[in-house]
Image (cartoon, grey):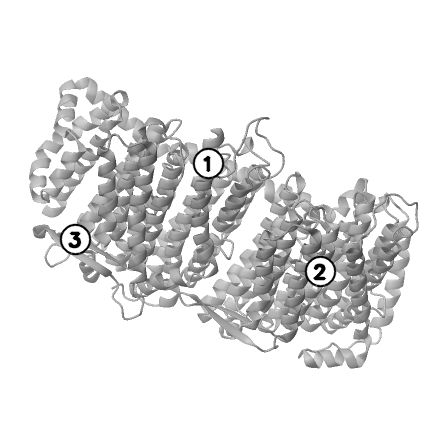
Amino acid sequence: MMLWGLFLCPVAGGLAAAIGPRARGWLAVWAGGVLASTLVLAILAASDAGTVLRWGGGLTLRAGLTPLAHVVAMLVPAVAAMVVAYAAQHEHRQGLRRMIALTLVFVGGMELLVIAADFLTLLIGWELVGACSWALIGHRWHEGAPPASANYAFVVTRAGDLGLFLAAMATFAGSGSFAFADLAQVSPGLLALVAAGVLLSAASKSGQMPFAPWLFRAMDGPTSVSALLHAATMVAAGAYLLARLQPMLAPVVWFGPAAIAIGLVTALAGGVVALIQPHAKKLLAGSTSAHYGLMFVATGAGYPLIAILHLLTHGFFKALLFLAAGVAGERAGDYQLRHMRFGRALPLTGAASAVGALALAGVPPLGGAWTKEEIVSAAGHHSALLAIAVTLAGALSAAYATRFQLAAFGRGDVEGTYQPGAIEKTALLLLALASLALSLLWVPAVHEGLARAWDGELPHAESWELPLSLALIVGGILAGAALARRSALGTQGVTSNAADWLGLPTLIDTSVTRPAFALASTAAYVDDYIVDAPARGAATFGRAAARLFARGDGAVVDRGVRASSAFGRWLAQRSSGIGEWLADAVPEGTASGVGTSGHLAVRMQTGMTHQYYATITGGILLIVALVFWGAA
Amino acid sequence: MLSLAILVPLIGAFVLALWTSASTRAARATAIGVSAVPFALLVAVWVGFDASPEAPLFQHLEEVPWIPALGVAWRMGVDGIALVVATMSALLFVAAAAWPIELGERAREYYAWILFLAGVSLGVFLTLDLLIFYVFFDLSLVGMYFLIGRWGHGDSQAAALKFFLYTLAGSLAILLAILGLVLAGDGPLTFDMRELIARQPLAGMDLRGGLVLLGFVFGFGIKTPLFPVHTWLPPAHVQAPGPASTILAGVLLKMGTFGLLRIPMAMMHETFARYALWIGIVALVSILWGALVALGQTSIKRRIAYTSVNHMGYTVLGIAAAGSLVAGHEAARALALTGAVVEMVAHGLITGSLFLMAGSFWQRTQSYEMADYGGLAGVAPKLTAAFILAAFASLGLPGLAGFVAEFQIFAGTFAVHPWLAGLALLGILVTAALFLTMVRALFFGDRKLPEGRSFPDLSRSETIVMAALLALVVAIGVYPAWLLEPIMASARILVGGAG
């Protein structure tokens, strides 16, 4: 039961926060407390504990912690605690309580998908996270852009969720259950389907190609939300899921190569986009896609432990960078890098950010550098060429990290007045300290010990990999420093288009979104005027025929009105026995059948009470049919 | 007890019809009080329902001979499926009666018709006699015809007439099919559903079985409604008052799918299995077409109305999957059937609440056009919260009722017809888009109502009704065992040799 506590604790805390006091201090303390409790629960949870909950109708919810899941289960509340405390002080007062409450539920959803041991539980957490991020991205609902972006993010990620539905369906068809453990019994054909579904949903959640643009739109949400989204929840879910299921899906031959291809393309494209992006948060968003791409490469190469370790280091340094960008953006009034250079004005924020930027750049001895080098080695096991491609992505990372740090916190003219508060500074410091502490990963005793404890394998490094990587990082840093001086980069012309995911959003808009809406409008028109046509035609025909009868023989119409009297009589006839009714109605009906259809025309003028006659017509037809049928 | 659940509202309707001096207030109070009786009775039946594997399919039986020569009798009884659908319907009638609405002078008649409709609708779900089923089925048309025609707005007469004639055509087909079914086979003439399920009268008759099935599918397909015979639905919904729309979507549409699984799927499972793939294909087309056309609508009510085509398509898909084999894949088929029934309950509650809220929009501003609103989150936070919750439930978010239904339908159907289930998934993507764009248009961004035009939030009685319905939506989504157990018990019996 303790495992479910990881989900229930933040969700209950969130619900309580939603109806509790609105004061900033209270929200910070409450949310911090809830997340700290969740962290304690995560630390105490036993790695191999599995638990099953009956959900009714033969469905069960399974939870379990593999060593990798355990790491992520601890990472999520740890990062979230700092981000949420920061949010309680940093974000605008309006709607703050709602935002903090949603953030807590968001963390609960993420924990649920982390502890999930079957596709049903996974899907519940997975989509809850999507819905929470919808609400958080659209937090400033009264403005035009955020709600639209929230919808965009939800629909794009839900397109990926279909993959999980597919995986769940295929697993059930193959094994009669939804449990990950039963994937071993699933036939190769169905397993391939599971792999495809998982890959699709992971790619969309983690902002990989071609779904990456939703991460840019998500930047319309508050900064704290972005930090949480990118570091520990939502986006992290994709890379986590891939690593979690890699052992089961490895038998599918194309699974690894496909993950590598998606990840590598995103890592390189995201790097280029981040390099020229003029918007501080979008620069970081591009880098998020790129680094999750690297995790995809690691998992695809067969080293899920490395992917999760990179998820860990990335979680801390990316949260740190977003929070720092939030402080700079608040002071600048927008997030344009060219309006920043707050090194002197915000020394502490700048220093903390520098730690994050160095980790992002992959500079030893920071932990982020170690995990990235391990990804290079993991890729090297696949092929040398792949290792070189990953070092290139590392060089891009170094370049945009440098550009970010120099542009945002370089020395420049001081403008603006905003200063971060005590909690904001504390959160920044703690995240920076955590990133520094992760430098210990370079110590062989530490990382070998971790690999043993977490039951994973570390790739063997080729001797040329580290020197090449370091050389490229130095080159990247120099290039980034040069680009940081060009303040107009990415604001006009070709670079401006390229900075927006190389034009991918426009492509999606013209090839998917617009056609879909056009198709819907067309379908609505077709439905009104074409699908409905036979029914309307029949009605028109009936009316015309009735009018003809009415004109030809008024007497029949008259008789119809009289003979058919009322609906009550029809009922009475029925209840008095079908046989009698039969004998009665056949002769009478033939006449009133004609009469009633004629009467339909009269009804148009005389009012609706006479609608009942239509029922009578029906009765007659049936009786006739009954007679034939019975005789046959 | 079951007979009481039908008779009490009918008597209530009769009393209201004769009680000419009743004020609007008294009429409404009577309607709420009387409609609560069958709900309470059905809850009691539910509590006493035996869902264990040894329990019989139909329970709480009542039988009074009526026309012995024809084998017609007042037979009542429920299986888990009828029980949950009837209970949900009874609740919706309480909600519809309690929902405040501007009625003018004829309020008493309005509430009388609601009670009449409650009685006959419950009759459809609770009876075990085919002839009585048909009588109640037809009477429900009459009740709905008057609710739409008299208390609707706009061109409500035409919409009501279209609804009436269209569905009447459907019920004619059903009557023919019923006769074709009952008159087939050996043994004394009977309209007893239990006997007919046991007899499988059309087994081995290819052409006749096919024709009878066609009659049922056509008739129930109109009511459900399935593509392409769904076009009566949007005008009926748009012109109907909010609570009538709720009953139409929440209760009357269920008669189509309920009939489909109660009669052809159970009483002629060989024939049903032969043509199940085609029924599934029609369901798939309804799912996709309903979602797509809904996305193309600009009016709140039409958009919600078309999502019914989509959601009932899921239900039919589940039924088609469940009935697609006579033997084999029992677990998956039972899952699909359970999902189909949960979808009926979920759709009733969710779409019922959405239509009630759509009615609130009309009450406040006399407009259903989404473009007329915007930014309402600021002035009507309760309505916003309830609408968003219902919208997410409708698009199948986990933790809410729709997900439980759709997940089971997809998983169960995939084992039998993988392609149908895979393609049907696209429906939930389009549904997400159509609900989110609607939520955004109504509640977020700039306020578009003219300056000075007020838009009050949900009133107290509206809040209570909405909270009750949505609380159930959440309860089903969070812990569905209490709903799934009785359904699954019956579903297992129905797929495992059908009786």
Q: Which-is-in-front pick, marks 2 and 1?
A: 1
Image x and y of residue B59, in percent: 24, 61
Separation (CA) of disc 3 from disc 2: 65 Å
Element carrying mark 3: loop
Mark on residue A434? Answer: none
10 Å neighbourhood of mark 2: few (<14), some, or many (≥20)?
many
Q: Are the numbered discs 2 and 1 placed on the same chain, yes or no? A: no
Of tags 3 and 2, the one toward the viewer is 2
Structural distance between the alpha carbons of marks 3 and 1: 43 Å
Q: Which mark is residue B360?
A: 1
Residue to which mark 3 is pinned:
B191
Amino acid type of the residue that numbered disc 3 sits on in the rendered structure: Phe
For label 2, the residue is: A231
Say yes or no: labels 3 and 1 on the same chain. Answer: yes
Compared with residue A605, is residue A581 higher up or lower down, i.e. above or below?
below
Q: At x 28% / y 45%, what residue is drawn?
A: B121
